Amino acid sequence: MKETEKILKQVTEENIKFIHLWFVDILGQLKSVTIRDRELEKALEEGIGFDGSSVEGFARIYESDLLLKPEPATFRVLPWCSHPQEKVAALFCDILTPEGKGYEGDGRLALKKLADRARRQGFEFKVGPELEYFYFKPNSTEPIDQGGYFDFAPRDMAANLRQETIRLAEEMGIAIDCSHHEVAPSQSELAPRYGNALTMADNLLTLKVITKEVARKYGYSASFMPKPVFGENGSGMHVHTSLFKDGKNAFFDAKDPFLLSATARHFAAGILTHCREITAICNQWVNSYKRLVPGYEAPVYIAWAQHNRSSLLRIPAFRHGKGTAARVEFRSPDPACNPYLTFSVILAAGLDGIEKKLALPKAVEEDIYRMDEAERKERNIPSLPGSLIEAIMLTEKSSLVRKALGEHIFEQFIANKKIEWDRYRTQVTDYEIKTYLPLL
C-alpha cells in the first residue's frame, strides 16, 4: 500500500477531521493552513494553494501564488488537541511554485539540497541538538522554580512538565534520549535522539509546539528566547554532528587520539573556518548576542577541544568501542534559530572543510575565559561576532552562505535582519533612562 493510501486509511479509521499543513517562514516561525479530511487526498496529490506574499521573506505580491505540498512521511496525529470522537493531525509541507517546482524561498528545500550534495559524496548528515528553554509564570519572566543543574524535585518544579512533553513527543514518534533541569532557575533541556538532519528540523519545530502547549495547559509559558533573564545563563542549542557512510560513522577512527577520522577533522576545520560568517544564521536575533558573551557558558571563542566547554567546538567523550557515537559538537547555535537554515550552513561549512581538506588547528584545553586578550591573540583564538549587525555584515560577504541557502533566502534574510537591527538600535531602553537621564 502506498504511503498516501495508508494516511487516507488512517484518517478514516481514526476519525481524523482536521489536518494542519505546517511550513516555516524565512525566520523559522511555524505557519499553518488547516484543511478538512475531505481535502487531504487533493492536498497530497496536487498541493494546496496559498498567498506567499503575506509570509515573511516569501514571494512579492505579483508572484504570490504558491503551493503547499505535504510530505506523507511527516504525518502525525496531534495528541494534545485530539479526542476519541474527533482527532487532529499535521503534515510538514514542501513549498512549490504553481508550475510544481521547488520554491527557492523554502528553507526546507535548501536543507534537502545540501543533504543531496552530501549524499552524492556518500554521506548522510546526522545531528543531535540539545534544546534549552525556560518556563515562566504567565506574562512575565518570573521563574517557576529555583532549581539548578540536574536538580531533582521539589526544587525542579518543571519535571512534570518535561515528563508530559516527552510522553506526547514519543506518542508522535519523536524519541527523547534525556531531559533535565539546566543551570539557571526554571531552565530545562530536552535532547531528541540523534538522527537525519531534515527529520530533526521537523522534530524540533514539533517539540517546541508541544513544549509550549504543555506549559500553557498548566498555566505557565515556555520560551526559547536565547537570553530572557539578565544575569542568568541563556538558552543554547548545542548541535552534535556527524556524517555516516555505508551505515558506518565516517567521523570515527580508533587509531586517532581523539578517535576522530580525517573526515571529522576536516569537517570540524570547516566549521571553525566559516563559523563567523554563519553566526547570523545560527544566532539570528538581536537577543541572541545577549547570550553570546563570556562568562555564562556560552561559547564565543573560536577553538576546539575535547573537555573544554569554553571552546566553540567540543569532541564529547564516548565509550571507545562505540564508534557510532563519534561526533563534533557545535556549541554556538541557539534554540530560536531556523533549524533548516542552521543545519544547512553547518553542513555547508563542514563539507567545504572536507572538500578543501582544511587542517584542524591544535586543540585548546585550557579555560579560555581565564585568558586575557593578549594571550588569546598570541594563541590565535578569535571571537564570534558580538552583535547582530556585526554578524550580518560578515554573512553578507559570505559566498558559502549565499550558495548554501540560495539567492532568494540569502537576500531576504539579510534584508530582514538589517530591518530588525535598525528597529532595535533606535529604541531608547530602560538602561539608558536609568543611566543617562540623571547624569546628562
Image: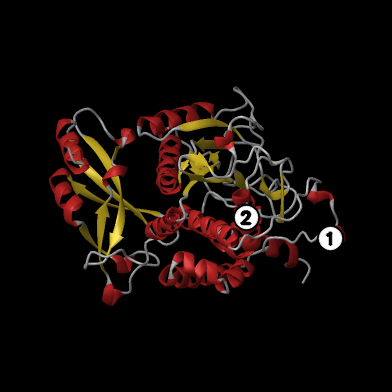
Mark 1, residue position: 373
Q: Residue at x 29, y 74 (%)?
A: 61
In percent of the image, x 51 and y 31: which residue is there? Answer: 177
Counting other residues with Cα less than 10 Å from the Cα at mark 2, is it few (<14), some (14-19), or many (20 or more)? many
Q: Residue at x 22, y 41 (%)?
A: 3
303 relative to 51, above or below: above
The quadrant the N terminus occupies is: top left
x and y, in percent, of residue 87 in the image: 23, 35
Quick check: 307 above or below 61? above
Q: Give whichever of 440, 7 is nearer the camera.
A: 7
* Element carrying mark 1: helix
**Extreme-front residue of the structure:** 255
Q: Residue at x 56, y 71 (%)?
A: 398
Q: Is residue 227 visible?
A: no
Residue 266's disc is 2
> On residue 130, which mark appears?
none
Specify whether 414 is left or right of 271: left
Give coordinates of residue 172: x percent, y percent: 35, 34
Q: What is the crowding at mark 1: few (fewer than 14 residues within 10 Å), some, or many (at least 20)?
A: few
